[in-house]
């Protein structure tokens, strides 16, 4: 009973975090997914856009919009559902063991601050994390002789990983881990799980590719869309100088797992592997957990996310969220093995005090991030855009950064160009017209949107000037936004 109450309290805490501490993270991708969900709701899909193939988060968001309308709450609901699935899997794994193991697993998970941050964000990474965790947990249950047979666990694992694939391609980072599992099991004559797993994966991929072919005329349309939108960016290690790749695989990796809160799991795995080796054959089975942690971290660093070139994952913690719950489980089970090897009891005050201190240290970065996030002032930005949309005389065109444009579309509920107020990307600013126009043009700026877009004030000024336009003082004023009238030189 207390296990269920704990998970219910955590779930309510996630909802409360969204309601009371939601600090917004609407950048390029987030609002782009919202727009794709709105398009899907109206039966429109752009198959030339690689993001359109991330059908799980987009489809669930479209369903949420259909049921509740477009709002911050309906946008966050699918991600909260994915977070709830992660909590449910934790419960399924730890419901028959010591209560402290579930508590520490949850602490370890939320001690990686980006897990809480993305728990309510419209990004595919939390969905990938949930489904990869489900697939890995199914394999773990098979390895530890769970109640369901190997065929059932294999079907669950295959379906979960297929859903992860339809959320985001970073599921490819699990390939090294599952390859090692496959080799290990086949060498020991354990093939039933893998036979079923392979058959179900082939069936699902055949259905998937057939559906894509019927919709687009090409079974490989998703990969063509990815190749068609490839561009030079800080993560293009296949194009950038070798020095950039070397930096990514050394200092960059250390910085990545440090910012993701994964360093404690690396330390636990290294120490745990040594202790388990010291314990002898009786504890050899527990080596699965530290080895899984080390393989996961090696995959984060070395595994390519491209099928055509060597391109390790970007130095952004959200791309590796899929490993967070896996590392949390492995660290707790590794700790349990260490305690067994040395014969340390967990029902003593010494252990309880140590667990409380460790929990506080692990959760501190997350608490610090939440405190910072509340200073971002997303609610003020939302109110400012609402005032702008409701009070600006029509017709009017508002040019700004891509995030400014996305926010405008989101708060007009993707109504398009039907309301007389048009949000446009600054890159689409035309040169001064030769004739007169009855449409007023403004430059829209805010630190929130321009910071998310990575666009400096100098860059905006240069872009405006390049089109023969001057941003002058505007009679239109909205608190929290900076509006300048665009006039021809």
Image (cartoon, rainbow, N blue to C red):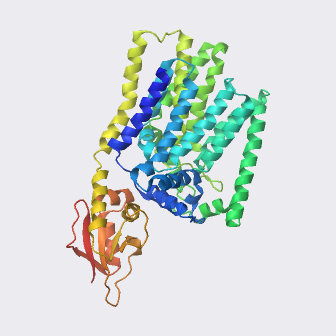
Instruction: Residue at the far bottom: name it.
Output: 435
Residue lying at 56% horizontally and 12% vertically, measured from the top left: 341
Q: Is residue 89 above or below residue 314?
A: above
- Whole-percent x, y for residue 186 in the image: 77, 31
Quarter of the view holding residue 117: top left
Residue 462, image x, y percentages: 32, 72
Left or right position of 207 against 256: right
Name the one closer to the observer, 155 or 295. 155
Rendered location of residue 466, percent (x, y): 35, 78
What residue lies at 35% left-to-right and 79% top-to-bottom? Answer: 467
Q: Left or right of 253: which side holds 146?
A: right
Quarter-of-image position of residue 464: bottom left
Q: In this view of the protein, can residue 164 be seen by the observer?
A: yes
Q: Residue at x 53, y 30 (%)?
A: 90
Asked whether 190 or 121 is in front, the reply is 121
For residue 118, above or below residue 49: above
State the image coordinates of residue 260 (x, y, percent, origin top left): 45, 39
In which quadrant will I find the C terminus?
A: bottom left
Q: Is residue 324 visible?
A: no
């Amino acid at each position: 009973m207390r296990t269920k109450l704990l998970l219910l309290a955590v779930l309510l805490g996630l909802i409360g975090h969204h309601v009371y501490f939601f600090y917004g993270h609407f950048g390029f991708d987030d609002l782009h997914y919202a727009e794709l969900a709105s398009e899907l709701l109206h039966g429109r899909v752009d198959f030339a856009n690689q993001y359109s193939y991330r059908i799980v988060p987009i489809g669930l968001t479209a369903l949420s919009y259909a049921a509740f309308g477009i709002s911050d709450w309906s946008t966050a609901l699918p991600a909260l559902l994915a977070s709830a699935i992660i909590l449910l899997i934790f419960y399924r794994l730890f419901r028959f063991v010591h209560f402290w193991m579930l508590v520490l697993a949850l602490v370890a998970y939320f001690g990686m601050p980006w897990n809480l941050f993305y728990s309510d964000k419209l990004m595919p990474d939390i969905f990938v994390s949930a489904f990869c965790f489900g697939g890995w947990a199914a394999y773990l249950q098979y390895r530890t002789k769970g109640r369901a047979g190997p065929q059932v666990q294999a079907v669950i694992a295959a379906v979960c990983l297929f859903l992860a694939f339809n959320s985001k391609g970073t599921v490819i980072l699990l390939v090294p881990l599952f390859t090692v599992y496959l080799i290990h099991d086949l060498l020991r004559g354990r093939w039933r799980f893998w036979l079923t797993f392979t058959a179900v994966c082939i069936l699902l991929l055949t259905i998937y590719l057939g559906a894509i072919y019927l919709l687009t005329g090409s079974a490989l349309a998703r990969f063509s869309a990815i190749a068609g939108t490839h561009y030079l960016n800080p993560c293009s290690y296949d194009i950038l100088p070798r020095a950039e790749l070397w930096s990514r695989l050394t200092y960059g990796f250390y910085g990545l797992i440090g910012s993701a809160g994964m360093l404690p799991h690396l330390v636990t795995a290294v120490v745990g592997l040594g202790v388990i080796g010291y314990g002898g054959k009786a504890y050899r089975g527990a080596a699965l957990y530290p080895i899984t942690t080390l393989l996961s971290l090696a995959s984060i660093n070395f595994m390519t996310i491209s099928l055509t070139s060597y391109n390790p994952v970007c130095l952004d913690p959200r791309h590796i969220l899929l490993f967070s719950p896996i590392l949390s489980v492995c660290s707790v089970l590794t700790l349990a093995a260490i305690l067994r090897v040395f014969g340390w009891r967990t029902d003593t005050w010494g252990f309880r005090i140590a667990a409380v201190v460790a929990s506080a240290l692990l959760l501190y970065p997350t608490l610090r991030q939440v405190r910072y996030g509340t200073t971002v002032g997303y609610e003020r930005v939302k109110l400012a855009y609402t005032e702008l949309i409701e009070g600006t005389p029509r017709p009017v065109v508002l040019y700004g950064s891509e995030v400014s444009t996305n926010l405008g579309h989101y708060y007009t509920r993707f109504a398009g160009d039907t309301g007389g107020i048009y949000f446009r990307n600054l890159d689409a600013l035309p040169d001064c017209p030769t004739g007169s126009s009855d449409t007023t043009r403004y430059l829209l700026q805010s630190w929130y949107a321009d910071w998310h877009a990575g666009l400096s004030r100098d860059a905006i000024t240069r872009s405006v000037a390049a089109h023969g336009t001057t941003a002058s003082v505007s009679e239109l004023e909205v608190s929290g936004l900076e509006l300048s009238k665009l006039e021809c030189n």
